[in-house]
Image (spheres, rainbow, N blue to C red):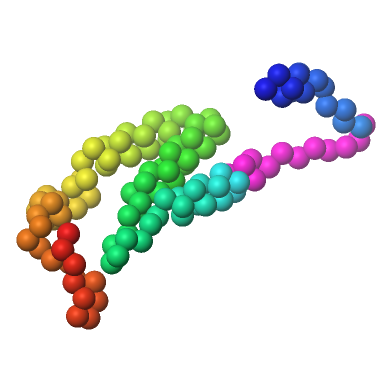
Amino acid sequence: MIVSITFAHRPWPIPEGVNVNIDPARIAYGVMTGIGFLGAGTIIKQGAGVRGLTTAAAMWCVAAVGMAAGFGMYTLTAIATVMIVGRAMDPGLLRGRDSQDALSDDRHPTTLGPGVSARR
């Protein structure tokens, strides 16, 4: 860390007549790629079900909010944060309230394909 701080305080020697272009989209591409790999690592197939999708989606949301804040889009960051936290605290927000109750009820089987079913 001391080496990084020392290196950051030194001026970069840029020869005369050289144009340095900084592309913020490259940062976003790197973040998207890294979060994609981390998210893929959280998704696990267990029997007929899949676990970790919510965790992967949450990681994408956090990365998107972080990039928006890093790019100076504070209004978008605040709106997205309220939407994400609201959705995480109330899972029935986008679905009907009845479907949320059905998700917690073990009496409703889930059909996975022809002749295959599993209980939730």
In reply to whether residue 62 is colored magenta, the answer given is no
Q: Residue furthest bottom?
A: 114
Q: Residue at x 88, y 37 (%)?
A: 18
Q: Quadrant of the N terminus?
A: top right
Q: Residue furthest left?
A: 107
Q: Residue at x 83, y 27 (%)?
A: 12
Name which quarter of the figure residue 44 lies in: bottom left
In the figure, is residue 31 to the left or right of 101? right
In the figure, is residue 86 to the left or right of 38? left
Q: Position of residue 102 (x, y in %)?
A: 11, 56
The secondary structure making up most of the magenta span is loop
Q: Position of residue 49 (x, y in %)?
A: 28, 62
Could you say which is closer to the camera, residue 92 or residue 83?
A: 92
Q: Is residue 5 visible?
A: no
Q: Position of residue 58 (x, y in %)?
A: 38, 44
In reply to whether residue 25 is colored magenta, the answer given is yes
Q: Is residue 2 visible?
A: yes
All told, the count of numbered labels is 0
Magenta highlight range: 16-28
Image vertical order of residue 12 relative to residue 114, above or below:
above
Image vertical order of residue 50 relative to residue 28, above or below:
below
Could you say which is closer to the camera, residue 10 or residue 24?
A: 10
Name which quarter of the figure residue 108 lies in: bottom left
Could you say which is closer to the camera, residue 74 or residue 97?
A: 97
